[in-house]
Image: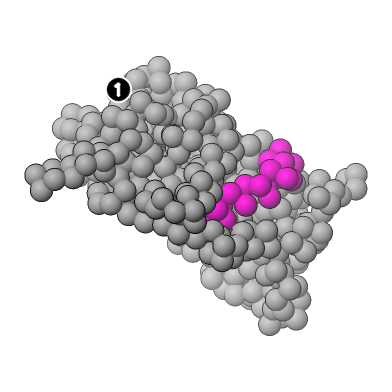
């Protein structure tokens, strides 16, 4: 693994880019791709692409069914991937890790299964104003279906959770608090261990949307103390179509199934069925078998770098980008300024220029950023913005990408005559 020099980012982004075939692809601009949209989905290293091809080429059969050699091989690799996820996030057992399609499905599973069984009129669920729609709409649906109340913890002007508001709402005795570890639109890193302590003291379970944290920093669900956590493989260098829900064993054991059908049962008669043990109780039908193996390869790759170094690298890029952009006339940055509270995701607006136009001009320079509401429309409403532009960093980015972003924004202002 390439390490930069003193004063340079901890990782050598250019050397790491050699592991990712996508960077061999020319852009229409004639410049190399500056990929600053990893918060939406990350690129894939050759190790993951090859693991996926190897899984389909040499280890593929359905799992949990066969007794022949190939099926046993597929099964043991699928279960090894579960163990890899469990270790990566500090779960005490792989039995607490349920494979799902993505973080969205993980959050829907908890809302529908736990919420459906435990919520009713008079109960209260808390979410926050900074959530991705994936940690918002499922709770709205379950609140509607069960008659439970749903309230949102407010956010401050600089994009932090308002802990006074949280305390006041916890005093009302909610049964559950659903929050993001890292906001995908603001970049805020929430103080999850502290919030979880507060929530537990108030008797609420904590559901953590870890879609933007697990790929980018060390995350230990046991140390954080949360009760459930959701993640997506495609955001952490892995394949799409695979994600995970982690939950405390006793909670998962007590929850009814989410989807029903094959694999999640032990016995079926025409009158009814008995459920399999966790985690298989929650894995109805044929799962994403090869993709689980690809996710294990992504975890191996990230671990070979070290999550502390991933976080330090992104923090360095964040600090440099923030320092350049905060002084730029006509640029407004979202989220906390402190690098301790801000992940490698920068949402911004350029005065007088629509975020889609900013993203289009940047694209013409070979810089890929996201523009829009980032599936967080309440955040846009909170700051009275129609949309924002968002740049997000990962291991393959370096200072050159930061400089190109800053130059590209300057060019955009010149093109629109707002400079
Ligand atoms: N939560 C957060 C904070 C996210 O950023 C995202 C993806 N943008 C999701 C949940 C949903 O992830 P997925 O689309 O992979 O289900």
Q: Which residue is mark 1?
A: 173
Where is residue 248 shown, x and y percent of the image? 41, 29
Q: What span is in magenta?
A: 287-310
Q: Identify which residue is drawn at 76% across, 76% down.
A: 31
Answer with left or right where residue 327 lies relative to residue 210: right
- Residue at 41 percent across and 57 percent down: it is 62
> Camera-side residue: 263 or 194?
263
Q: Residue furthest front?
A: 68
Circle 1 — which element? loop
Counting every numbered tag in the picture gives 1
Front-most of residues 24 and 216: 24
- Judge whether residue 405 is colored magenta: no
Image location (x, y in percent) of residue 379: 44, 50
- Hey, which residue is sitting farthest right in the picture? 6
Q: Based on the displayed image, in which of its 4 quarters is residue 139 positioned? A: top left
* Side (left or right) of 15 relative to 173: right
Image quarter of the C terminus: bottom right
The residue lying furthest to the top in this view is 201
Residue 30 in view here? yes
Q: Is residue 309 magenta?
A: yes
**Compared to 256, does 372 lie above or below?**
below
| Direction from residue 180 to residue 43 in the image, left or right | right
Label 1 within 8 A of ligand 1 by Cβ: no
């Amino acid at each position: 693994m390439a390490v930069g020099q003193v004063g340079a980012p901890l990782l050598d982004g250019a050397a790491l880019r050699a592991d990712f075939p996508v960077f061999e692809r020319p852009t229409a601009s004639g410049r190399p791709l500056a990929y600053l949209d990893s918060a939406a989905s990350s690129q894939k290293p050759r190790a993951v692409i090859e693991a996926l091809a190897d899984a389909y080429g040499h280890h593929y059969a359905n799992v949990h069914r066969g007794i022949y050699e190939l099926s046993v091989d597929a099964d043991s690799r699928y279960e090894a991937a579960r163990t890899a996820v469990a270790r990566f996030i500090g779960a005490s057992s792989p039995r607490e890790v349920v494979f799902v399609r993505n973080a969205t499905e993980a959050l829907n599973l908890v809302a529908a299964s736990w919420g459906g069984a435990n919520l009713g009129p008079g109960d209260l669920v808390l979410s926050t104003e900074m959530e991705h729609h994936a940690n918002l709409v499922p709770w709205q649906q379950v609140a509607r279906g069960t008659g439970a109340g749903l309230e949102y913890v407010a956010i401050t002007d600089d994009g932090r959770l308002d802990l006074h508001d949280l305390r006041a709402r916890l005093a009302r005795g909610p049964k559950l608090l659903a929050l993001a570890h890292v906001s995908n639109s603001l970049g805020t890193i929430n103080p999850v261990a502290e919030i979880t302590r507060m929530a537990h003291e108030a008797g609420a379970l904590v559901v953590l949307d870890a879609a933007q944290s697990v790929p980018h920093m060390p995350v230990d669900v046991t140390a954080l103390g949360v009760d459930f956590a959701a993640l997506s493989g495609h955001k952490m260098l892995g394949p799409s179509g695979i994600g995970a829900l982690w939950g405390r064993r006793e909670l998962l054991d007590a929850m009814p199934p989410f989807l029903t059908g094959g694999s999640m049962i032990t016995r079926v008669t025409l009158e009814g069925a008995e459920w399999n043990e966790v985690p298989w109780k929650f894995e109805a039908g044929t799962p994403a078998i090869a993709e689980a193996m690809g996710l294990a390869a992504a975890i191996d790759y990230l671990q070979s770098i070290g999550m502390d170094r991933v976080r330090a690298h992104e923090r360095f890029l964040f600090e440099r980008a923030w320092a350049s952009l905060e002084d730029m006339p006509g640029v407004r940055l979202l989220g906390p300024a402190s690098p301790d509270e801000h992940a490698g995701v920068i949402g911004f607006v350029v005065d007088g220029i629509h975020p889609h136009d900013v993203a289009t001009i940047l694209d013409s320079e070979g810089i890929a950023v996201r523009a829009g509401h980032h599936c967080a429309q309440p955040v846009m409403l909170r700051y009275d913005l129609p949309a924002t532009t968002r740049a997000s960093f990962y291991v393959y980015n370096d200072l050159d990408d930061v400089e190109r972003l800053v130059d590209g924004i300057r060019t955009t202002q010149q093109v629109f005559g707002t400079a």
